[in-house]
Image (cartoon, rainbow, N blue to C red):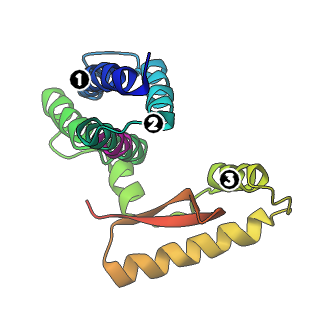
Amino acid sequence: MSDIIRGKKEVLIIERELNELIHEYDMFFQGHERIEPTKKRQKLKRDILNLQTLRINNPIIKQKAANLTHKFALFQGKWDGIWLRIEKGTYKIDRYKMKIHNKLKGKENPPKNVENNENKPQAKNYDKLLNKYEVTQRLLGVNKELNKEVLSKKLQQQAEILKKKYKAKDIDFKVIVKNGKATIKPILIKD
């Protein structure tokens, strides 16, 4: 089968699967589903990577494949951002549910420990991020040992500077590969 015909079929299948995955994640984050569809997400990620290896000469199919890749990347960022807000306790749906739950119990204000955790600046644990950075560097051929304590302190200082400069609520970091080198990119969280 030629790459053009195969590419057209793959694009249609991936488009359908992506729309199903978006729906399933919406249902999961609203609380209608109990299990996150991670297996489907990983399968779709592999399918998109396979699609990118095909040689597609048809500009319409090529553009549609690029749009699907971009759409998937955007939704991955959205889902990861929602997980981050859930972990911090700032996800709107969870806060709304907690408010209703407290009203039903007769409490008007949320528990004091939740308010104190939000207002009190805490030192973040960057171990997971630095492990990912180290693994990415090794995959790229850089076998250098990292001083994780020093890097963690630098990331904390940079986060504080960026919070003040951009008036962000919080700063998160992400490992990216740019020009063949692994770097840590800050991400502003405004809400």
Q: Residue 174 has which mark?
A: none
> How far separated are the C-alphas under marks 2 and 3?
40 Å
- Residue designated by label 2: 55
Q: Where is residue 12 in the image (x, y as percent from the top left)?
A: 27, 22
Q: Where is residue 42 in the image (x, y as percent from the top left)?
A: 49, 26
54 drawn magenta: no
**Amino acid type, mark 1:** His
Read off the magenta span: 69-76
Q: Which of 167 and 68 is in front in this view?
A: 68
Residue 10 in view (yes/no): yes
Are the residues at dot 2 and dot 1 in contact (C-beta closer than 8 Å)? no
Q: Which of 25 and 83 is in front in this view?
A: 25
Residue 103 quadrant: top left
User: Which residue is located at x 28 percent, y 64 percent?
Assistant: 190
Residue 28 quadrant: top left
Image quadrant where one finds the N terminus: top left
Q: In the image, which is nearer the foreground, mark 2 or mark 1?
A: 2
Q: Which of 98 and 68 is in front in this view?
A: 68
Q: Is residue 160 left or right of residue 143?
A: left
Are the residues at dot 2 and dot 3 in contact (C-beta closer than 8 Å)? no
> How far separated are the C-alphas under marks 2 and 1?
30 Å
Residue 106 in view (yes/no): no
- Residue designated by label 3: 127
Q: Position of residue 86 (x, y in %)?
A: 37, 41
User: Which residue is located at x 45 percent, y 36 percent?
Assistant: 55
Q: Position of residue 122 (x, y in %)?
A: 52, 63
- Residue designated by label 1: 23
**Amino acid type, mark 3:** Asp
Which of marks 3 and 1 precedes in the sequence?
1
